Image: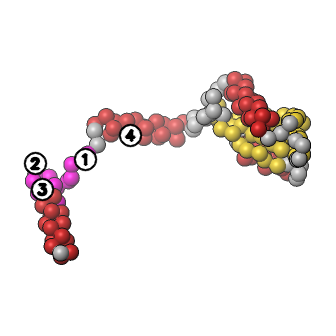
Amino acid sequence: MRCLNRTRFLALLFIVMSNQLLAGDGSLKPQTQFSPSFMGSVKKLDAIAAASNKTGKTGVKICSCQILEMKSNNFEHKNVAVFAEKTNFGKFSADYGVATDVIEKEKKHIRLFFYDKVKVVNKVAEATDCKSLYIKLKDADQSLVMYDILDADVRK
């Protein structure tokens, strides 16, 4: 029974392949199954990526950070850093505001769900990515602990 099924499958595969390769307008290339609009959008994305590589305008990362002290009945944590990273294309003050708002929302959730008191010890904002800023702050203070790097591009 297995041999019969295998033979049927191979015969069907041969028929499909011969129709694709030998029938039609005489060319041996298989026909594409993508719509012209899909291929056009892929070509546009390739062109945009190539242009951004040539000009170097991919957006600069900016990072806003708040260092917190958090207290609850059972726990107390000091030097906890919450970061928010945003891609900037020219409006630095507005994007710093968006990153700060994202941190404020996260602090609100921290206060609501986990800790009774959340106190801001320090605020830092720089035109760099958050990973580099964390390394810089960690070199200055070894007791610093990262809470999270929040993506301010996604969060609204």
Marks 2/4: CA–CA distance: 27 Å
Residue in the picture at 65% in, 38% down: 151
Q: Position of residue 45 (x, y in %)?
A: 43, 38
Q: Which residue is mark 2?
A: 25
Label whose residue precedes the other's in the sequence (2 or 4)? 2
- At mark 3, the secondary structure is helix
Circle 2 packing at 10 Å, graded few (<14), some (14-19), many (20+), is few
Marks 2/3: CA–CA distance: 11 Å
Q: Which residue is mark 1?
A: 32
Residue in the picture at 18% in, 63% down: 13
Q: Which residue is mark 4?
A: 42
Q: Are marks 3 and 1 in contact (CB under 8 Å)?
A: no
Marks 3/1: CA–CA distance: 14 Å
- At mark 4, the secondary structure is helix
Q: Which residue is mark 3?
A: 19
Indicate left or right for 37 with 120 as reference: left
What is the magenta range?
A: 17-33
Q: Most prominent secondary structure in the magenta stretch? A: loop
Q: For residue 20: magenta?
A: yes
Instruction: Judge whether 16 appears above or below 150 on screen.
Output: below
